[in-house]
Every structure is written in C-alpha cells, then in structure tokens.
Amino acid sequence: MRALCDNDIPPLSDEVLEATVQARLERQRLLRERPNTTYDFIVEESVFVCRLGGLDVTREMIEHVLEAVAPRNVTLQIMPADAEHHACMAGPIQLLERPDGSWRGYSEGQENGRLIADSKQVSRLHMRYARLRSQALSPRKTPWACWSGCEERYEHVRTRLVQVQLQQRTGGQLR
C-alpha cells in the first residue's frame, strides 16, 4: 500500500502519505469486523504481476490479499489481462448497499470521484458489474492466479494459500 502511495505525482508529504496509508488500513479492518457483510472484489491481474515496489513488496501484497480474502464473507475474482471482453473499461466502480436496501454507486478516475444515487445509473453499474463477474476468473481459480507465472518466487505463497483453503474447509485454525 505504501509503495502505491510512494508513486503519486506530485509526491505526497510524509504526513499525507501516512494518513492515506492509515485510512486504507482502517477501511480494510471492516472486512474482519463485519463478518455478516458480504464483500466482493474484482481486481485486474496486472495488480499482481506489475511488481510495484519490487518483488518483496509484491510478495507481501499477495500474502496480504490472500489473508484478507480468507473469511467466508469476502470474495475475490481476478480479471485476466488477456480477456477479450471487459465490461468496465470506463473505469473502476464500487456498488454499496445502504441499510435501507437502496444502492449507491461510486465511480472514480484520476483526480476525481463521483457518488451516484440516480437509480437508473446505479442499475447500469449493476449490469456492468454482473457482466464483469462473468468475465473474471472464478473465486476458486483466483487465488492461484495471484501467483501464476511466478511459482518459484512465490512458492511460500502457494503453501500459505493451501493452508488458508484447508482452514476454510475445516473451519479450524492451523498451527
């Protein structure tokens, strides 16, 4: 996460960089603290292969992602880099269900973000997301794709992934 922030142009001040990292960590805490909330993510394959920050940072990021998606309420799919179709080429989207059951969308780009409340626009985002889910790798194949092509470098990640999957199946803690 810090490597991502280190690449901002213009560079962030140390204080802003630290505040940004802490805010992201705080949001990630929700994945653990709200086990009855469903979180579904589709991430571009390039995130796992571009080595932003170097090989060690990439390895740590993959380990972090695998731990974050281990709970049953969190699902990760990877959008393959060689996909012939991609429903969200216009940019990343987020869909958020409110406590009253209504939905909001959030679309972001460089230097801006936009909250979408109009039901017709949110419906279009839902359609795009549904199509994207069908185009992405299944959640079962996704963890393996995190390190595919780098088996030797990420062998310990593969071992950790097997441990996480066994833990999910048995419902117990591994030692």
Image (cartoon, rainbow, N blue to C red):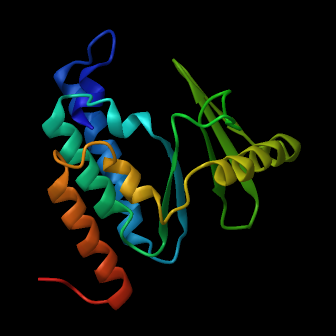
128 on left or right of 133: right
| 68 vs 56: above or below | below
Residue 11 in picture, x, y percent from top left: 26, 13
Where residue 149 sits, quadrant-wise, is top left
37 on left or right of 135: left
Residue 43 in picture, x, y percent from top left: 49, 44
Quadrant of the frame with the C terminus: bottom left
| 167 vs 33: above or below | below
61, 4: nearer the viewer: 61
Considering every residue shown, the one lying at the far top of the view is: 10
Quadrant of the frame with the N terminus: top left
Please count the marks in the image. 0
Image point 26% across, 54% down: which residue? 64
Image point 13% across, 39% down: which residue? 56
| 145 vs 161: above or below | above
| 139 vs 79: above or below | below
Image point 42% across, 33% down: which residue? 46
Image point 29% across, 63% down: which residue? 67
Residue 120 in picture, x, y percent from top left: 88, 44
Residue 74 in picture, x, y percent from top left: 47, 66
42 on left or right of 168: right
Where residue 20 sits, quadrant-wise, is top left
2, 57: nearer the viewer: 57
